[in-house]
Image: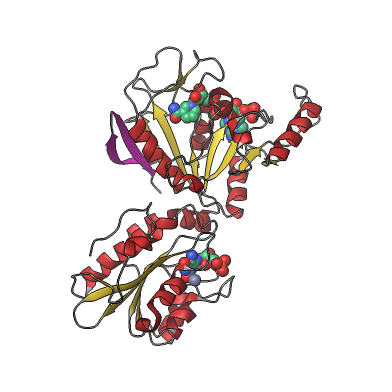
Amino acid sequence: MTPSDDTHADPAAAHARGSSGVETGLASGAEADARLMAEAIAVGAGHLGLTASNPSVGCLIVRDDGAGPRIIAAAVTAPGGRPHAETQALAQAGEAARGATAYVTLEPCSHHGHTAPCAEALIRAGIARVVISVVDPDTRVSGRGIAMLREAGISVETGVLEARGERALEAYLTRKRLGRPHVTLKLALSRDGMIGSRALAVGQGQVAITGPESWDHVQHLRVRSDAILVGIGTVVADDPELTVRLPGLEDRSPVRIVLDGNLRLSPDSKLARTAARVPVIAVAGVLSPDDGDVDPHGRQARADALSALGVEVLEWDPRRLDLLLPALASRGLSSLLVEGGARTATSFLDAGMVDRLLLFTGSPTIGAQGIASPVRSGLVPAPFMHTSGEAFGPDHLDIYERTP
Ligand SMILES: NC(=O)C1=CN([C@@H]2O[C@H](COP(=O)(O)OP(=O)(O)OC[C@H]3O[C@@H](n4cnc5c(N)ncnc54)[C@H](OP(=O)(O)O)[C@@H]3O)[C@@H](O)[C@H]2O)C=CC1
Ligand SMILES: Nc1c(N[C@@H]2O[C@H](COP(=O)(O)O)[C@@H](O)[C@H]2O)[nH]c(=O)[nH]c1=O
Ligand SMILES: [Zn+2]
């Protein structure tokens, strides 16, 4: 078996197989279960950022006819969230599913939602054993899928490679458990801890801090996110596009969100001009009668112009992250990538709304005109814990995770 960890490739194509399936070279048992679940997790990761409110689940159908386990089908939740992984894998396997084992990263669903329950489909297909990584916290499922399978006489094992499974499904699990998206804050820091420069005139573009290798990695982070968020200060200063521009993955751009309490977003900005292609939400707050410094007519005209371009102007207080994030979650957004700037990063950190912190440190120094980052590598306070570090060309990425 060559387990696939390429989350960017088409997961089904990664499993090109003949009618006899993919030999794994393993003997059945706990080690094979773990290896096959690792493969199911890799397959499931293939549609992160594409399945909206649904988790991107991986499912393998595996047969052992005496010569060791063979993968006869592999599927991931379809873009948009349906069909679910199991029904697609069962369709691929056909009659060969009878007596086989299903490896599923999330407990098979038991509810009649938009589709019939996957647990029922597994039973009907004659699956003999189901191996599950994570139990589904969805209140419509939550143990019922497992119970249905067991009642039908299927042998069920749960918690296989659970930590890795939880990590792969972290966005979905955070939304279900905490009622808000999983938040990754990513910042690019100069060697002296700055994220930008005040010396640049508006529209002069951003300071180059990190190189192409980091850029490539951030593009992949965007691919796997449901939404990307910045403050209006960044939009005014840099006029970013915030899309995915990797060849072949251009259609994987996440929803773009701007915190913009005074609706300063210009209809001429790259965000507004591309809104018809990739959604943009401007979180614009509600004008109160004493907002003396804002011309309500100007604001309304801007709102109209932006709406005509396809920007959604959301009258929600961008300062109340404690309310905004649950509102985004209720739209089905499970993973949020916050890309700055300094004030926005500070707000998310102060509100305790950052689950993972990615600090890219580049080689340039910016000096006294710099805009200081609210956090610096090596100086990140609790509750964050440094979990890994990696080089990207001349840059260094440090990853910190929130500890419970
Ligand atoms: N190196 C890096 O990783 C990055 C660097 N940058 C740099 O950062 C600089 C911009 O940073 P900064 O000026 O701090 O601007 P931000 O992008 O953080 O935007 C801040 C503005 O957003 C609005 N806002 C609305 N709600 C919130 C909220 N909850 N929290 C914070 N702000 C909110 C406010 O404007 P209002 O009152 O009008 O609503 C506020 O002034 C630029 O120089 C840019 O190049 C930017 C991104 C990444
Ligand atoms: N994506 C996925 C599952 N997702 C489950 O289904 C719920 C959404 O149901 P519905 O809105 O009807 O599609 C979601 O909250 C989660 O419980 N289940 C599975 O068996 N396999 C899958 O591949
Ligand atoms: Zn299902």
Residue under the image location 43 percent in, 36 percent down: 186
Horizontal arrangement in the rendering, residue 231 relative to residue 60 (left or right): right
Q: Is residue 354 above or below residue 134?
A: above
Q: Is residue 362 above or below residue 49?
A: above
Q: Position of residue 196 (x, y in %)?
A: 46, 21
Q: Is residue 345 magenta?
A: no
Q: In which image quadrant can residue 10 be found?
A: bottom left
Horizontal arrangement in the rendering, residue 23 relative to residue 294 (left or right): left
Residue 124 in sight: yes
Q: Is residue 190 above or below residue 402?
A: above
Magenta-colored span: 384-403
Residue under the image location 43 percent in, 32 percent down: 187
Residue 134 in sight: no
Q: Position of residue 68 (x, y in %)?
A: 20, 77
Q: Position of residue 199 (x, y in %)?
A: 49, 13
Residue under the image location 40 percent in, 61 percent down: 44
Q: Is residue 388 magenta?
A: yes
Instruction: State the residue in front, 264 or 241.
Output: 241
Q: Is residue 109 above or below residue 54?
A: below
Residue under the image location 59 percent in, 70 percent down: 114
Which quadrant of the rendered structure holds the N terminus? Answer: bottom left
Q: Position of residue 260 (x, y in %)?
A: 64, 32
Q: How is the image coloured?
A: secondary structure
- Magenta segment, principal secondary structure? strand
Instruction: State the residue in front, 141 or 296.
Output: 296
Q: Quadrant of ligand 1?
A: top right
Q: How many marks?
A: 0
